[in-house]
Amino acid sequence: MEVAHAEMRLELLCETVRFSAEKTLFYSNLKSVKIRSLSDLESIPLISKIDISKSGASMLTCRPDVGSINISSGTTWGDYLDASTLGGELKLKNLAEPAFVYRSPEEDDLCRQLTISNLSAGLTLRIDNGTHGARHYKHAKEISFPLQKPFHYAAIKKIIRDSPKIFGESITGVCGPSNQLKNLAAMQDLAKEKIFSPFGGPDYLIGYGSFVTSKWRKLLGETYLTELTDAYAISEILGSGSPQCNICKAYHVQPWVIPEIINPLTGLRALSDSGELVLTCLLPFSRVQPIIRYRTGDIVRVRKCAIDFSFLPCGKTGDSVFSKDGQLVIGGYELLERLDSIEQINKWHTPNQKMLGIPSSYGPPKIQVMRELTSAKKSHNDQAKPGIRIELSKNHKNDKSLRDLIKGIINSDGHSEEIFVDFGEIDESTVRMPKQ
Ligand SMILES: [Zn+2]
């Protein structure tokens, strides 16, 4: 199957590059690029969120009949905050300009059909981040609810209970950004309720957009009464949504997307089996706004699978620890997984959780990467070793055996460089909080 994908991808890549060069100002210098093999893709410059933010309009192949505008706020908390917020006041007029990706209604339809048709034919409840009230997509058989205020919990409970009367059937599937699935689970946990149990739970639960540790997978399973299927997706790449593979437990990109792994420091193809994921979306997707060699900011490890190339997301470039030459030492998600169950570590209390009345004990562990790739110049770059700061709760600040245990957990697999672990208070105004 891999060969078939490669042949199809090469054909579509030639067409995508030719089309983009002809139709857009941004890619016009690709007219001279000759694509004979997939590795020729390397001769095309990489682009990042900043390019889309600054030059998105000159990437358009036509004046679009817009079906949707995807605004990338990103899974990295802080993308929408100006640097002046770091240690200072938020200056609204200085907010970073978001990256807009435009889609035609046809592209939206195509994407929706492909993702929805993979689900069961039943009624899907989407627990969303949206702020514009509930929407009901008639053809997609999907009810979308925000979860931003405590009363939304009651509203979701009501729609689950009343859906047989309103729609003639029970909710059969639940999906949404994983942070919201977690918030709903936390609220159920706090209320000591199982709001899905009258129907025996949905048939499927699909989450995306942020990392879910095994501790949270267990809680999600208990409260939704079904196991989480995680999906990788980024809003900039149309149709990038890829559910976790049953065979390799990693993620496969869709056949119409080409993956590459680069060294995040040099931008060159990674020689090791980890690095930053770069994606190119092929025609017929992104016909309105082609996206070629997009740096996702996602750090991944490559996995072997009989089906096709697969990868495991291990963190973002901004929350992972790298060696001086850009090699991954440990990913931000890998750190969360290892430290999530240690109760004595203080937890982040995210704005979302605060609004929903969820206590900080449900938050992710409070850790700060001290030598991340993107902020090496900001602080701590004089550290001899890559470092992580961990904030312990008041009563355990000086617990030596706990400190040794944590150091051991972090350095248990003999990384290329030993990770320095510092225990101290974290100044929240200087650190990006993980999305919860
Ligand atoms: Zn697989």
Image (tube, helix red, strand yellow):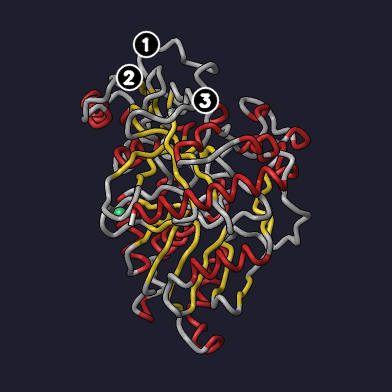
Residue carrying label 2: 420
Label 3: few (<14), some or many (≥20) within 10 Å? few
* Residue type pointed to by label 2: Phe
Q: Is residue 41 above or below residue 175?
A: above
Res 311 quadrant in image: top left
Looking at the picture, tell me which residue is in the foreground, 239 or 44. 44
Q: Are marks 2 and 1 in contact (CB under 8 Å)?
A: yes
Q: Is residue 178 visible?
A: no
Q: Earlier in the sequence, mark 3 or mark 1?
A: 3
Q: Helix, strand, or loop for circle 3? A: loop
Disc 1 crowd rating (10 Å Cα; few below 14, some 14-19, many 20+) is few
Q: Residue at x 51, y 83 (%)?
A: 163
Query: Which secondary structure, mark 2?
Result: strand
Q: Is residue 146 above or below residue 45?
A: below
Q: Disc 3, disc 2: CB below 8 Å?
A: no
The percent position of residue 77, horizontal first and vertical second, equals 55, 40
Q: Residue at x 72, y 36 (%)?
A: 54
The earlier-in-sequence mark between 2 and 1 is 1
The reply to whether the residue tagged 1 has its Cβ within 8 angstroms of ligand 1 is: no
Residue 22: image quadrant is: top right
Residue under label 1? 384
Query: In this rendering, which labeled residue sits more in front, label 3 or label 1?
Result: 3
Which label's residue is closer to the chain start, 3 or 2?
3
Q: Position of residue 253 (x, y in %)?
A: 42, 52
Which residue position holds label 3?
374
Disc 2 to disc 1, C-alpha distance? 9 Å
Residue sitting at x 39%, y 74%: 202
Q: CA distance from mark 3 to mark 1?
A: 17 Å
Which quadrant of the picture is home to ligand 1?
bottom left
Of the residues shown, which amino acid type is indicated by label 1? Ala
Q: Secondary structure at mark 1?
A: loop
Q: What is the quadrant of residue 403 in the picture?
A: top left
